[in-house]
Image (spheres, rainbow, N blue to C red):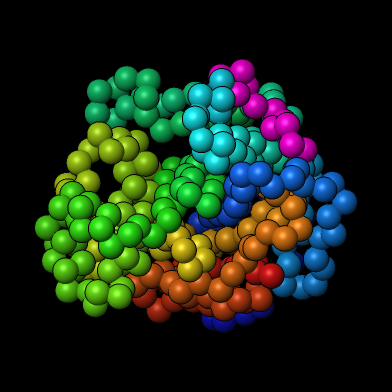
Amino acid sequence: MDTAHAPAPDPVPTRPAPGHVDVWLVRPPLPGRPPADHHTPWPSGPSHTPRPPGLSTASQPPGLSAAELRRAASFARPADRAAYATAHTALRQLLGRYLDRPPGALTFVREPCPGCAGPHGRPAVVQAGGGPPLHFSLAHSRGLIAVAVAPRVIGVDVERLPSPETVEACARALHPGEQAELAAAPPGERRAHFGRLWTRKEAYLKALGTGLSRHPRTDYLGSDLSRRPARWAVLDLPAGPEHAAAIAVPGDRPDHITVRWLPAELPYGEGALYGEDAPYGEDAPGANPGGTATRSPRSGSTITRSSR
């Protein structure tokens, strides 16, 4: 597919077609910020993503299970409580729209672990009435949440770029080839380079179903595509200047990846930033702001990006 203007997305999310991936980004509320206004105006125009109907702006997280509410309340820091509640609220509301079910009626289970067959593998949503499978992955870091949805197994990760001291301390956990690439990067680019390496790695391990029980040093997810795990596609995503993000899927690279920012009023009001321009990683599908789609010569995938 050559460069083309992306059509305005349907306001009601539909299941991604084979070869397609949907990624939704949302910012958690800031501590001390007042609840969002239900009447916050939604920007209009061809480059804006319509607000999916049914996404709540209430301060009380709608649809969360008793276990999720207990988990949210267990966090000591208000920012962590807000991030967890926002992430799981967004996940339930998005999956509810895809599956045409109330968010609170969704039931989540754990697939068998690929290592020990125990019930702690990839999370999955129970789908009533059959139909094609719908897979998802959820990630959140300081200041950003990502939900990825696809018709096949998928992993997503997002990380706030670490401090130089954290990069130095955590680099030893990387694959030797990744450590060499990080050491060769210019000092001013090492934080972003580490962020790309780590998000690729976590996205891959989440899609694999092992998480970090598989040592991060085991698999190479660096710049040399020929050295990466066979029969897997791992791609960087745009996530703004302060974060790195990536997805991983088994098999061929997705033909089309749509990255959308959920409305600013969903998490915390009109003043929220969303859809910033962001640099792409070394092998990420390229994209232009304003809803254009660009094919990356390296990835063969197309990203459609909705930006403010």
Labels in figure, total: 0
Q: Is residue 63 magenta?
A: yes
Residue sitting at x 29%, y 30%: 114
> Is 212 left or right of 130, judged from the image as shown?
left
> Up-down: is 139 above or below 298?
above
Q: Nearer the viewer, residue 293 or 53?
A: 53
Q: Is residue 19 magenta?
A: no
Does the image show residue 250?
Answer: no
Residue 103 sits in which quadrant?
top right
Q: Nearer the viewer, residue 283 or 35?
A: 35
Q: Nearer the viewer, residue 266 or 206?
A: 266
> Up-down: is 188 above or below 239?
below
Residue sitting at x 24%, y 77%: 186
Q: Farthest residue toward the front?
A: 32
* Secondary structure, magenta segment, majority class: loop
Q: Quadrant of the C terminus?
A: bottom right
Q: Nearer the viewer, residue 133 or 89?
A: 89
Span colored in magenta: 58-69
Residue sitting at x 54%, y 81%: 2
> Up-down: is 88 above or below 183?
above
> Is 146 left or right of 45, judged from the image as shown?
left
Query: Where's residue 212, x and y in %?
Result: 28, 38
Query: Where's residue 202, x and y in %?
Result: 34, 47
Query: Where's residue 218, x and y in %?
Result: 17, 47
> Is 119 left or right of 94, judged from the image as shown?
left
Residue 97 sits in which quadrant?
top right
Q: Farthest residue toward the bottom?
A: 3
Does the image show residue 177?
Answer: yes
Query: Where's residue 206, x and y in %?
Result: 37, 41
Residue 67 sits in which quadrant?
top right
